[in-house]
Image (cartoon, rainbow, N blue to C red):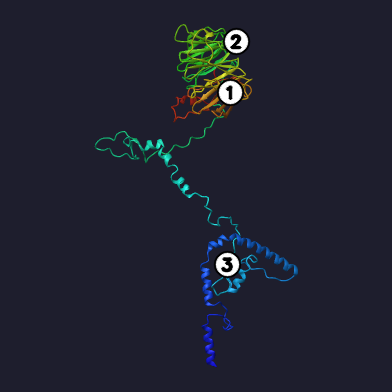
Amino acid sequence: MSRYDLDSIIQQATAMDGTSNLPTDLPSKPPRWQRKHDSQLYNSFNVSNVLNHTNELLTNLTLADNLKRHNETTANTIGVSSQPLKTPGKTPNSKRSSQQNSSRVGLTPAGKTPSRHNGGPKPMPKTPKTPIHAGMDRYIPNRNGMDLEKSHYLMTQANKNDQENDPNLRERLGGNLDQYRIMCYADKAPVSQEGPAPNLRVAYSSSKNAPSAKKATRVIPSQPEKILDAPELVNDWYLNLVSWGSSNLLAVALNSAVYLWNATTGDIKCLMQTPENEYVSSLSWIQEGNQLAVGTSLNVVEIWDAEQGARLRKMPGHSQRISSLDWNAYLLSSGSKSGQIFHHDVRIPEHHVGTLDGHTGHEICGLKWSPDGKYLASGANDNKVNIWSGGQMTLDADSVSPLQQLGHSSAVKAISWCPWKPHLIATGAGTTDKHIRIWNASNSNCLYTVDTKSQISGLEWNEEYQELISAHGFQNNELNIWKFPTMTKVAELRGHTHRVLGMCMSPDKSTVVSLAADETLRFWECFPVDTTKKKKVDMSAKKTSINPIRMSLR
């Protein structure tokens, strides 16, 4: 009996099929050949097939989730306790359980993956619910629409031809390096015995100076730097009663007298005086020198030497007062209330060499020569600006006509030529117009227009800052600074209590003086000179004399 039992045990141990004869206390597991087959299937599982069927699995998960909710609702309704379906990922313990799960795909959350492990079920990560777009997985983008070869060409070869044809590059590559020193050091190398090195330009330098700091923001004072009293000033908008000469002398006409204020020393003296009941109507300094032209209500033009205090010439000819004057080298042009313009050659006894009559019967209140001396602009009470050729000098006024006519709707007194663009001219008109207009004098095209809301009595350009400053009478009584070419307002200079009658600029173009009907002269330092760009005129004495203390010209 014992031998029979021993044979039976050996037979069961060596059996290849079946599990029914194993002792009941041993754990149940598939046969060895079945486990080996399952292991091979697991190891050779194709991940790409799973990715291709992701959409189908998601659909099955959705159906399973809906079924799960339906079962829970039904169980709660009939009062029967039911176990919710488990999250997929549990490893089955037998082939039969795996087959049962695989037969329920679409009804349960997911089928169970066969495992070769004998232990209990191990949790697996949940299936991600990130939506998967057709044609790509979650990590690798779809490159079917990409042309990788073309992209590589554009990155490496696209600009090659342009660089090869660049003339600047060719010039630099083909340059003659014999004219350059390749390196330049802070400490100079010792001089060779053969003599000093030739003058060669520096190509590269290890001691290159650091770039200069950014220019500080410009501050425009809102208050005048100095105020001078101007008593008995003739309050007439058509007259030009102030002029600043190259020798830094400021001339001001106060009724019948002309006073000179030395901006360097602060000294004041009276240059000349007209007879009783007459007055000075216009002033103009020659470009270089001490000669001052004076127009009077006696219809004559006088030339005075400011240094000696003596009259050099007296030039009659006009039939009415001279309200405007301007120099072009040795040629002095005068405009009168009759509307005529006379040209005077101050070198010869017969000084009257030309006549212009384009504003017949209308007072000439503005007169300016262009910086190159080729054109003369005249503004008058007929609301027009005439551009004349400087080469036409004749006493026959009928044979000369203006090259261009620029229109306003009020009398034009403020005229100024642009110093860095000789063909541009700025004009400003009176109370009815109130506009600044910038013209192309070659073809009379109006390029810019600004409504200043006030009468315009003076215009001056500043080349360093490329700005335009305007003086205004009724009703604002102020000075405005405009940025060219945008014509945006930079600053407003206020202080006068009555209309501004005239304005002029200092020789170094840093200071503007305004003369107003409130009988004051106000000095505004609104254009500080940059000493790194140009040498400033010696104004040290002026700096000491300019102060807030109020003074009088008399």
Amino acid under disc 1: Ile
Q: Is residue 269 visible?
A: no
Residue extending farthest to the front is 17
Q: Is residue 448 left or right of residue 286?
A: right
Residue 145: give x, y in percent of width and height: 53, 50
Q: Provide the secondary structure element on which disc 1 rests.
A: strand
Quarter of the figure with the C terminus: top right
Q: CA distance from mark 1 to mark 3?
A: 84 Å
Q: Can you give x and y, in whole percent of width and height, for residue 232 in the image? A: 59, 15
The numbered mark, 3 or 2, whose residue comes first in the sequence reads: 3
Q: How many marks?
A: 3
Q: Earlier in the sequence, mark 2 or mark 1?
A: 2
Figure quadrant of the N terminus: bottom right
Residue 320 drawn above or below residue 265: above
Q: Amino acid at mark 3?
A: Met
Task: Please tell me whether residue 393 is drawn above or below residue 446 in the rendered image.
Answer: above
What residue would you read off at disc 2? 361
Alpha carbon distance from label 2 to label 1: 25 Å
Tell me if label 1 and label 3 are in contact, CB under 8 Å: no
Which of the 4 image quadrants contains residue 365? top right
Q: Which residue is mark 3?
A: 124
**Which numbered marker is on residue 239?**
none
Callout 2: few (<14), some (14-19), or many (20+) C-alpha neighbours within 10 Å? some
**Relative depth, front residue between 423 and 76:** 76
Q: Image height check: is 361 above or below 408? A: above
Secondary structure under tag 3 reads loop
Q: Earlier in the sequence, mark 1 or mark 3?
A: 3
- The dot on residue 436 is 1
* Label 3 to label 2: alpha-carbon separation: 108 Å
Residue plotted at (45% across, 46% down) = 153
**In terms of depth relative to the viewer, which is nearer, 360 or 324?**
360
